[in-house]
Amino acid sequence: MSVNPRYYYNRNRLLEKGASQALNAGNYFGFKTKLNSAILEHYDISSPALLTNIHWGMQRAISGNFQIDFKVGLGYAHNLSSFFGTMYPTLDLKLSYVFLNGNDWKQ
């Protein structure tokens, strides 16, 4: 399970430049928290962990309904079975296809 709120900070500047805002394009700051457990992952050897990170990212439409999302940041993993934790760098690149977006809905 994970939660990933974002704050898009440059959407007005993109509008002023005439850049596309399709599929929620923009640069953002985000926070992600994820719970990883043996029950959720179906592994008996893993111990439950809470992973949190802060990151900067950008999301853009690249062609039709395809979008690319890139983020980089710093995270902390806390082992819930003990008092141990560690810092780690985060890097994420995601290619997505949006089947239906707000512009597709007719009222």
Image: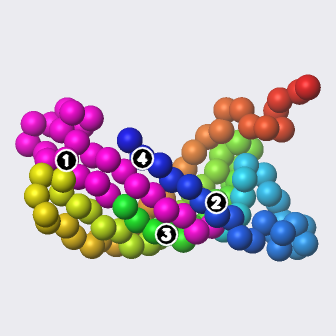
Query: Who comes first in sequence, dot 4 or dot 2?
Result: 4
The quadrant in which the N terminus is found is: top left
Q: Is residue 94 above or below residue 16?
A: above
Q: Which mark is residue 59?
A: 2
The answer to which of 42 and 2 lies nearer the viewer is 2
Query: Who comes first in sequence, dot 2 or dot 1?
Result: 1
Instruction: Residue at 27%, 73% (x, y): give it.
Output: 87
Residue 54 place in picture, x, y as percent:
46, 68
Residue located beneath label 4 in the image = 2
Q: Amino acid at mark 1?
A: Pro
Query: Who comes first in sequence, dot 1 or dot 3?
Result: 1
Q: What is the secondary structure assignment of the residue under circle 3?
A: strand
Say if mark 3 contacts mark 4, CB within 8 Å. no
Q: Distance from label 1 to label 3 (Cα)?
A: 23 Å
Q: Amino acid at mark 4?
A: Ser
Q: Amino acid at mark 3?
A: His
Q: What is the secondary structure assignment of the residue under circle 1?
A: loop
Residue located beneath label 3 in the image = 55
Q: Which mark is residue 33?
A: none
Q: Which residues are magenta?
A: 28-51
Say if mark 2 contacts mark 3, CB within 8 Å. no
Q: Distance from label 4 to label 1 (Cα)?
A: 14 Å
Q: Distance from label 2 to label 3 (Cα)?
A: 13 Å
Task: Mark 4: give few (<14), some (14-19) or many (20+) Cα within 10 Å.
Answer: few
Q: Distance from label 3 to label 4 (Cα)?
A: 15 Å
Does residue 106 appear left or right of residue 64 in this picture?
Answer: right
